[in-house]
Image: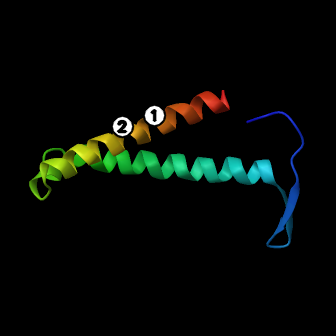
Amino acid sequence: MHGGSSSRQQIGGQDIDEDELLRAALSAWADQTRELLQWIDQQGDAVSESRTPKQVMALGSFRTHLVMGLKALRYAEG
């Protein structure tokens, strides 16, 4: 992520580095985001059947931002 010192924290009786916590949280977010994107893709046209055109457009924009977030995370980790 970034160079520099990170502090440690007690969680469940374990001493855990905050950078490790951040990495774990980001990894969990990425996994859940991929699952959500896969679900949206599997829904196909069914997503629009019960939604207004504005809702469908908003969902498309949301999907795009999730994909960009995953890409940004990959670049940040690389």
Label 1 amino acid?
Met
Name the spot of residue 67 as percent of width and height, x first: 42, 36
Residue that appears at 87% across and 37% down: 4
Q: Total label count?
A: 2
Query: SS class of the residue under badge 2?
Result: helix
Residue that appears at 18% across and 49% down: 54
CB within 8 Å, label 2 to label 1:
yes
Name the spot of residue 75 as percent of width and height, x first: 60, 27
Query: SS class of the residue under badge 1?
Result: helix
Residue that appears at 13% across and 54% down: 52
Label 2 amino acid?
Thr
- Residue 77 drawn above or below residue 51: above
- Which quadrant of the rendered structure holds the C terminus? top right
Q: Nearer the viewer, residue 31 or 53?
A: 53
Report the residue marked by disc 2: 64
Name the spot of residue 19 as percent of width and height, x first: 78, 48
Q: Tell me the quarter of the picture where residue 12 sits.
A: bottom right
- Residue 76 drawn above or below residue 8: above
Report the residue marked by disc 1: 68
- Way the structure is coloured: rainbow
Name the spot of residue 39 as percent of width and height, x first: 31, 50
Disc marking residue 76? none
Residue that appears at 18% across and 51% down: 47
